[in-house]
């Protein structure tokens, strides 16, 4: 009996080795030509699942329990992993260091883009693939010179060097950019479109142009942009605004060729929603990103032996938990909200400028969330936050308040936390955390993204796949 068990273990180990070798060889026989890398900025595992459960509840009408099947395509991909995100100089990363780790394969200091700890430029995956003849697309719901998209084309010692970053975007020669506007252009008051056209880019800002453009180099910019040049949240989107799914669909049309393409697609405002503890806008933007994943999956099913799709995040934001008091969790209750925290804050400031008192502000708050029953306890919390927000900007000289709100508006954060709590969603902070994030994948080499991963392995595994089975 003992000999039988030993023999069985040896056979199973041998089969496991054979499977590993066959998977590696499969990566060689099936030529990887098309890569989609989706990055949900700030999108932790709890954020992904909350969006999934919310969509399930809305689609089925059952708000009290989880269905038998996941609803988001990104969560149904067959390979699942978990990924740590820390930079070289801390436990908690920022989008610049995290983007660089995924684009360049090295952990670097916070706030730096595409450079090592001595500020020496690091060649990134897009530059390597372009040298091989692949076409490159960089897509985001934020400004094109924001940290995550910039990590895939720029090399700067400070993520705040927006003008230099924008110039490197233009000089990259990458075939397709799609985004909001440019932070550099807003800060320095110049016309980014004129500079892009001088650099040989066709600028598209209308839907009919988006569907027909065929130039070699294209920058699609959303017709509207708000804070820091970003596209509106899905919860605020108008009919003329583009979607991330449209950006991906157009990218496929423009980039598909015999040699291959790499597309980085960022759901950038998921992070912004989490910074304000705005659960509804977070959910809406994750669902919008999932619709973009569907576009990639449509392409994948036509190119099964040539395509890899990866969906992950650069870090978690907000310390979000699924469940609050008394084991209560009802994400469908988020549906009553009419717009983002970003737009709410603008509306409240306009009211204050016109002399609105606290009671009118509370009335507006109830209407914003579709509720009529704020409790005395909730109103007292709002009153304290209102007085604090009226006193001026919070800074590190106010340690208790700074820990709670950082530099966010106390009234806005408190209002959105109250509404989140009514859906059973808790927030631990308004900043990034060190919580690991989920990775899911499908296609050629997807099995490499299973298990516990380091953030640098997004780069190293892609590098290995396009250069044979040997690692970097």
Image (tube, rainbow, N blue to C red):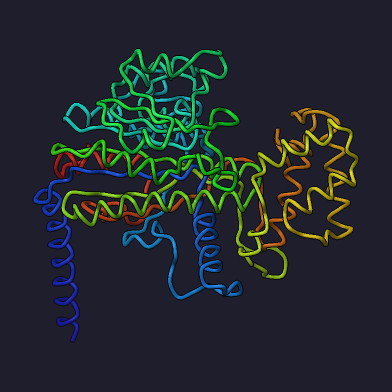
Determine which quarter of the picture holds residue 259.
top left
Q: Residue 208: which quarter of the image?
A: top left
Expressed as whole percent of the image width and height from the top left, the position of residue 264 reads 35, 38
Q: Position of residue 193 (x, y in %)?
A: 43, 19
Residue reaching furthest to the left: 29
The quadrant of the rendering that contains the C terminus is: top left
Q: Give the left or right position of residue 442, taking residue 393 as reference.
A: left
Q: Is residue 182 above or below residue 8?
A: above
Indicate the quadrant where residue 79 lies: bottom left
Q: Is residue 433 visible?
A: no
Image quadrant occupied by the N terminus: bottom left
- Residue located farthest toward the bottom when viewing the structure as drawn: 1
Q: Is residue 311 visible to the viewer in this orientation of the structure?
A: yes
Residue at the limit of the structure toward the front, as seen here? 208
Residue under the point 38% across and 20% down: 155
Horizontal side of 416 relative to 247 (left or right) equals right
Q: What is the x, y in percent for residue 297? A: 30, 54
In-front residue for pair 12/280: 280
- Total labels: the figure holds 0
Q: Residue 60 in the image: state x and y as whole percent.
A: 52, 72
Horizontal side of 379 relative to 115 (left or right) equals: right
Q: Residue at x 59, y 44 (%)?
A: 236
Residue in view at x 49 percent, y 23 percent: 182
Q: Is residue 56 left or right of residue 15?
A: right
């Amino acid at each position: 009996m003992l000999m039988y068990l030993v023999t069985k273990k040896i056979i199973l180990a041998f089969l496991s080795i054979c499977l590993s070798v066959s998977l590696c060889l499969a990566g060689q026989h099936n030529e990887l030509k098309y890569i989609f890398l989706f990055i949900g900025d700030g999108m932790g595992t709890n954020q992904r699942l909350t969006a999934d459960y919310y969509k399930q509840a809305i689609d089925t009408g059952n708000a009290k329990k989880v269905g038998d099947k996941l609803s988001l395509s990104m969560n149904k991909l067959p390979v699942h992993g978990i990924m740590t995100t820390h930079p070289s100089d801390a436990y908690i990363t920022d989008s610049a260091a995290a983007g660089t780790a995924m684009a360049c394969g090295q952990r670097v200091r916070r706030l730096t883009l595409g450079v090592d700890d001595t500020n020496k430029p690091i060649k990134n995956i897009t530059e390597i693939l372009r040298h091989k003849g692949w076409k490159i697309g960089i897509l985001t719901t934020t400004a094109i010179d924001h940290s995550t998209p910039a990590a895939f084309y720029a090399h700067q010692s400070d993520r705040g060097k927006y003008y230099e970053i924008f110039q490197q975007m233009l000089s990259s020669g990458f075939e397709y950019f799609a985004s909001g506007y440019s932070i550099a252009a807003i800060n320095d008051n110049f016309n980014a479109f004129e500079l892009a056209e001088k650099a040989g880019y066709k600028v598209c800002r209308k839907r009919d142009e988006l569907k027909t453009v065929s130039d070699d180099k294209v920058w699609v910019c959303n017709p509207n942009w708000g804070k820091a040049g970003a596209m509106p949240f899905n919860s605020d989107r108008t009919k003329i605004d583009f979607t991330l799914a449209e950006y991906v669909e157009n990218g496929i049309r423009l980039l598909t060729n015999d040699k291959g393409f790499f597309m980085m697609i960022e759901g950038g405002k998921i992070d912004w929603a989490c910074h304000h503890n705005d659960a509804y806008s977070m959910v809406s933007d994750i669902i919008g990103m999932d619709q973009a994943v569907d576009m990639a999956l449509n392409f994948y099913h036509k190119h099964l032996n040539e395509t890899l799709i990866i969906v992950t995040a650069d870090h978690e934001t907000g310390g979000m938990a699924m469940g609050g008091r008394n084991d209560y969790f009802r994400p469908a209750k988020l549906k009553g909200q009419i717009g983002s925290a970003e737009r709410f804050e603008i509306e409240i400031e306009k009211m204050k400028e016109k002399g609105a008192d606290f009671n009118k502000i509370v009335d507006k708050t109830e209407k914003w969330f579709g509720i009529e029953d704020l409790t005395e306890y909730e109103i007292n919390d709002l009153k304290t936050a209102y007085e604090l927000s009226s006193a001026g900007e919070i800074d590190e000289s106010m340690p208790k308040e700074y820990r709670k709100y950082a530099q966010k508006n106390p009234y806005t954060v408190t209002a959105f936390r109250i509404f989140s709590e009514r859906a059973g969603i808790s927030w631990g902070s308004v900043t990034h955390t060190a919580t690991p994030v989920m990775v899911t994948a499908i296609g050629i080499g997807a099995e490499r993204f299973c298990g516990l991963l380091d953030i640098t392995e997004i780069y190293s595994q892609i590098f290995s796949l396009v250069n044979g089975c040997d690692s970097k």
